[in-house]
Image (spheres, rainbow, N blue to C red):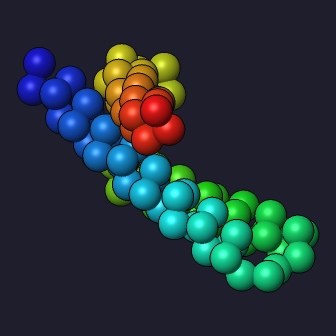
């Protein structure tokens, strides 16, 4: 039970960090007059680096993708991001 709580806690926090990171990155791209191709490149590089760091920083990195702890973590990540987006735009 402790490991499930830890997975929910870590991945929810990473979901919140991802929302803050993506919000700031999108605002940065929108504020600067950058052409569309460079904007997509910046966003793609930023999101790729963030997910790679989050994937490696998690203590559940060594588990298979279909392990219950990984599924619990990914679901908590998605629920956290969806809740923040819904609350932010209401």
Residue 44, position in %: x, y? 72, 61
Q: Quadrant of the N terminus?
A: top left
Residue that appears at 88% across and 68% down? 36
Residue 66, percent from left and from top? 48, 20
Pinpoint residue 42: horizontal percent, then vertical percent.
72, 71
16 lies left or right of 29:
left
Note whether residue 29 is visible: yes
Q: In this image, 3 relative to 86: left or right? A: left
39 sits to left or right of 23 = right
* Placement of 69 over or under 45, stated as above or below: above
Is 48 placed above or below 64 here? below
Relative to 19, say whether 2 is above or below: above
Q: Nearer the viewer, residue 36 or 50?
A: 36
Question: Residue sitting at 35 percent across and 22 percent down?
Answer: 72
Q: Position of residue 38 (x, y in %)?
A: 84, 75
Q: Nearer the viewer, residue 65 or 20?
A: 20
In the image, taking residue 69 as reference, residue 9 lies left or right, namely left
Number of labelled discs?
Answer: 0
Residue at the left extreme, as displayed: 2
> Which residue is rendered at x = 69% and y = 64% of the image?
43
Q: Residue 57's quadrant in the figure?
A: bottom left
Residue depicted at 33% across the width and 39% down the height? 11
């Amino acid at each position: 039970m402790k490991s499930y709580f830890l997975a929910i806690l870590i991945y929810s926090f990473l979901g919140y960090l991802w929302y803050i990171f993506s919000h700031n990155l999108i605002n940065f791209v929108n504020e600067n007059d950058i052409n569309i191709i460079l904007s997509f490149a910046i966003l793609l590089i930023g999101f790729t680096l963030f997910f790679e760091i989050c994937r490696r920083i998690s203590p559940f990195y060594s588990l298979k993708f279909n392990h219950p702890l990984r599924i619990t973590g990914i679901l908590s990540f998605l629920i956290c991001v969806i809740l923040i987006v819904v609350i932010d735009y209401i």
